[in-house]
Image: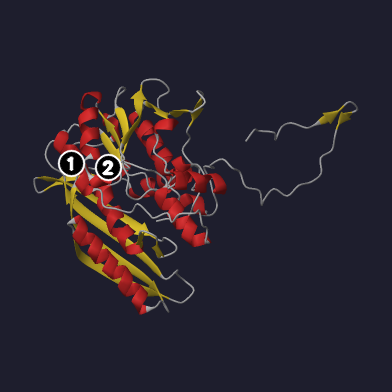
Amino acid sequence: MSDTTSQTPTTAQGPRDLPTVDITGWACPAPLRETPRVVMGHGGGGALSAELVQQIFVPAFGGELLAQLGDSAVFALGGQRLAFSTDSYVVRPLFFPGGCIGDLAVNGTVNDLAMSGARAAYLSCGFILEEGVEMPVVAGVADAMGAAARAAGVEVATGDTKVVEAGRGDGVYLNTAGIGVIPPGVDLRPQRVVPGDVVIVSGDIGVHGVAIMSVREGLEFGVEIESDCAALGGLVQTMLAVTPELHVLRDPTRGGLAAALNEIATASATGVVIDERAIPVPPAVANACAILGLDPMYVANEGKLVAFVPREHADAVLDAMRAHPLGAGAAVIGEAVAAHPGMVVARTPLGGTRVVDLPLGEQLPRIC
């Protein structure tokens, strides 16, 4: 926003009086350093979320581990390197094509650990239930969590239950925390990214967010779009078996692929160039986004990852990913560069370029 406080519009005859305007209800489209109230964008994984964390939580809690701001905290304990992560889930609706809030809670935390290279071992689970929710709904969520945990090879070891008054919740909210062991020689963090690294995405993007929106709003796109919700631990271990020298992994959830790339570019102080034509977007998602006015790069995913891989290992890693069920659609979409550090630039199908900014908030709220 430009600063006009000291400028008085004039006419040929001299200064012109301006009417009195009440600006207290105005909203600025740019992120503000001081926001008097929480808005939905603060939970969207974009610029507003980053401001909330950096301006309130990091100063309040302090600590070197938190300052890393990774998908999980990485630390040494008892002679082993561990990863520790927590996440909360408020998706609406609770059940959606391809999964439910229970699958999401397990897979999301397993994936956060996997992005550090960790093999997930144990999860905690907190249920926040609204008075009046049907018991079969609670049982369905719990059963889905148990099945997802067994499929991911992780144990739900402890938990908690709280109930809030009717009208003070939205059926079921979940919190999960997880802990896993990082194998020796694995060091995944954005600070390791260097110019020349190849950027690989594991498959079609935008599927989860569009699946949630379609069922939430009762939209039909000619074909049912199912969430890509999945645990990525096995895919990550397959990649690490090729080489432990992967530089960084991220699962592009809230804020989508665009947010993940921007976070890596900023933390690594490198630029990122991507080719829009190389990004795998299924036709159903592309059509849905065109109708809804969304950009698939900003739509959430729950079963995909983006990897920055040293160029000498890129072909072998890509082949290994494509041989795994969760990486069959893997594609090279760009590279890290020395130019424009901290910025993500996309080459468009028309031959031009555009800056891919960090989203302000989130195009589709309550998707995880």
Determine which residue is flagged by label 2: 327
Vertical placement of 203 versus 136: above or below? above
- Quarter that holds the N terminus: top right
- Residue type at mark 1 is Thr
Q: Earlier in the sequence, mark 2 or mark 1?
A: 1
Q: Amino acid at mark 2?
A: Gly
Q: Nearer the viewer, residue 65 or 234?
A: 234
Locate residue 210, reporting x and y percent. Answer: 46, 52
Residue highlighted by disc 1? 238
Which image quarter: residue 257? top left
Question: Which residue is at the front of the view, 112 or 233?
Answer: 233
In this picture the colour scheme is secondary structure
Q: Residue furthest right?
A: 13
In the picture as drawn, the residue positioned furthest to the top comes out as 339
Q: Secondary structure at mark 1?
A: helix
Question: Closer to the observer: label 2 or label 1?
Answer: 2
Answer few, some or many: residues within 10 Å of disc 1's Cα (few below 14, many 20 plus, some between 14 and 19): some
- Compute the Cα span from label 2 to label 1: 10 Å
Give yes or no for contact between labels 2 and 1 (Cβ–Cβ under 8 Å). yes
Location of residue 355 in the rendering, given as x and y in whole percent from the top left corner? 49, 29
